[in-house]
């Protein structure tokens, strides 16, 4: 999916830098750090899952997160799952990843980025809705380590549940992958154009991959 999204964005003239191009573990704190002053948007692609329990295979659907305190039990669950990789990281990076969220949220400039993150998350959900066969769980917020170090608008997209048969089929089907990548690209391009109109400056787009 990451490569499909990259190719679709490049086809539309959007510059893309991938945080990784192979199946290797990169510290969560290091991924968001790719998105600095030359970046317009950080996008992290993920697949959800549930632990074995009664009816766990029936849950499906997609959701998009931005950085803030988790407000629901489900958001807390996903936050804990996505941040689990911190225990595999080097001690120095792990402490950096634990940056106090309250301090981050008090940064006025970053607060503007958080508002923009919420906006692009909403646009992603709207574009994915017609092409995804699962439930639209909407825009959510959580304290994801991968988003903390991004100093520009940043979102994390949960594309579906690997523990659900319908979602799993959708995520491995090449045509469905293309449709999902195109939908996300549509949202990214629309957001960048909207932001350009608001700021009156040309967007030197640095869409960031997973």
Image: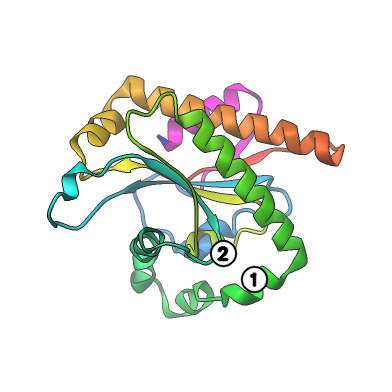
Q: What element does badge 1 sit on?
A: helix
Q: Is residue 96 above or below residue 206?
A: below
Q: Residues within 10 Å of mark 1 (few under 14, many from 20)?
A: some
Q: Which residue is mark 1?
A: 104
Q: Is residue 38 left or right of residue 131?
A: right
Q: Which residue is mark 2?
A: 148
Observer able to see residue 36: no
Q: Residue at x 54, y 49 (%)?
A: 155
In the picture, residue 133 is in which quadrant?
Answer: top left
Q: Residues within 10 Å of mark 2 (few under 14, many from 20)?
A: many
Tag 1–tag 2 contact (CB < 8 Å): yes
Q: Is residue 146 above or below residue 137?
A: below
Give the camera-side residue of 2 and 142.
142
Question: Is residue 116 toward the left or the right of residue 134 in the image?
Answer: right
Q: Is residue 191 visible?
A: yes
Camera-side residue: 177 or 37?
A: 177
What residue is rendered at 73% in x and 56% in y? Answer: 112
- Kindly identify the residue that appears in the image at 61 percent across and 49 percent down: 118
The residue drawn where x is 32% and y is 49% is 48
Q: What is the x, y in percent for residue 200?
A: 87, 37
Q: In terms of image quadrants, where is residue 189?
A: top right
Front-most of 45 and 115?
Answer: 115
In the rendered structure, the answer to whether residue 199 lies left or right of residue 59 reads right
| Distance between mark 1 and mark 2 Cα atoms | 8 Å
């Amino acid at each position: 999916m990451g490569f499909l999204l990259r190719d679709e964005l490049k086809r539309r003239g959007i510059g893309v830098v991938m945080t990784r191009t192979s199946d290797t573990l990169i510290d969560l704190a290091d991924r968001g750090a790719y998105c600095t002053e030359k970046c317009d948007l950080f996008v992290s692609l993920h697949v959800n899952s549930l632990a074995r329990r009664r009816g766990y295979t029936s849950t499906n659907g997609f959701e998009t997160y931005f950085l803030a305190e988790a407000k629901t039990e489900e958001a807390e669950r996903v936050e804990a799952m996505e941040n689990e990789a911190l225990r595999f990281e080097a001690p120095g990076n792990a402490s950096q990843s634990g940056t106090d969220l309250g301090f981050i949220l008090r940064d006025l400039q970053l607060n503007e980025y958080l508002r923009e993150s919420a906006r692009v998350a909403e646009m992603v959900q709207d574009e994915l809705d017609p092409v995804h066969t699962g439930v639209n769980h909407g825009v959510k917020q959580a304290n994801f380590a991968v988003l903390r170090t991004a100093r520009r608008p940043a979102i994390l997209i949960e594309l579906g549940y690997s523990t659900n048969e319908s979602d799993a089929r959708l995520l491995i089907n090449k045509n469905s992958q293309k449709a999902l990548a195109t939908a996300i690209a549509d949202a990214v391009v629309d957001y960048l154009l909207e932001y350009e109109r608001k700021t009156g400056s040309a967007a030197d787009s640095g869409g960031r991959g997973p």
